[in-house]
Image: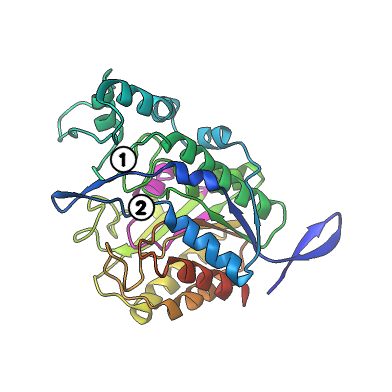
Amino acid sequence: MVTARLRGGTAEMTALDIVFSSAHGAQHGEAELTDGIFTPCYEQPSRADRVIGELRRRGTGGVTKPHEDGIRSLETVHEQGYLEFLETAWPRWKAKHGDRDALPLNWRAPGMRRDIVPRSIDGQLSHYSFDAGTPITAGTWEAALAAAAVAASAQALVSAGSRAALAVSRPPGHHAGRDFYGGYCYVNTAAIAVERAREAGARKVAVLDVDYHHGNGTQAVFWQEPAVFTCSLHADPRDTFPFFSGHADETADGTNLNIPLPHGTDWQSYRPGLERALSGIAGFAPDALVVSLGVDTWEGDPISHFRFRTSDYPGLGRAIASARLPTTFVLEGGYGLEAIGANVAGVVEGFESV
């Protein structure tokens, strides 16, 4: 389905816009700590490559390169000290420890101080991270800049009049906060899209996070922002990463909605929660919608426990389209490589069919 974009008072028919940068491949970690052992990283370059390959194969939209400034986009969301850490972490780590992935040594326990940033790279890795599954590598900063530019560029297209755009950005972003990283996420691409929409004139923006895991970083970024409504459907954090965020009682005085769901949730049992989320978004009456599009809800995902089938994802796209809002999709999780492309394409095609 094509969509209308206004240019100089006339309607130009276009397909959904897709933004992609091959620079995402610079982030390629060797291993993560999972279940007590080091395993190859589930979050790898082939994820985005599979998505863009399938979209191109189907002729779904036109693919463009990012045109926004990555560092300026990062500065709209993240604290300067954190960005300086990300930019310098790899060369400092390599100088001290050699050419291997940088992972933290320890984390703060309750009662330990957060107000003093350690001087050593080892201490700073522990200060800014919250897990041992998100290695910093030689290309982390380059990939982070590219992801920020991709998300900002997709949102800029929507703000300029496109009905919708898809940011095929990697690494994912919804676990990253203003000054912390983890969950494979270094910079929060959904939050960057939100801030780009607000810069372009949106008074209120909603975020709908459909990734299997709770978007703790996005929630933290906008926790005290009344002009942004954040909503996440995800596996119950009592059972699933990130464990310490995403419970139903985290409401931020009405601008945050969490809908935790049990392991084994399939599309039919997911739909009532999605309807509740869309009702909450409608009640907020935003000018724009940003969707954290994770497809790790798929039944074969190696690190998740929902039961979506590939044939369910067009229905998810149609449901999102029912919000009738300018929509920016930002790629999040999805680690079943054999299906990630078809699952993302299914959402896009379902959205475009409405």
Above or below residue 258? Residue 141 is above
Amino acid type of the residue that numbered disc 2 sits on in the rendered structure: Glu
Taking the image as shown, residue 32 lies to the left or right of residue 197, namely left
Residue at 66% x, 46% y is: 201
Q: Is residue 200 magenta?
A: no
For the N terminus, the image quarter is bottom right
Badge number at residue 43: 2
Q: Residue at horizontal 46%, vertical 46%?
A: 25
Residue behind mark 1: 135
- Measured along the vertical axis of the image, is residue 146 above or below residue 40? above
The numbered dot on residue 143 is: none
Residue furthest front in the image: 99
Task: Give the answer, above or below, for where 167 lies relative to 73.
Answer: below
Judged from the image, the secondary structure of the residue bearing numbered disc 2 is loop
Part of the protein shown in magenta: 206-227
Quadrant for residue 180, please give it: top left
Q: Quadrant of the C terminus?
A: bottom right
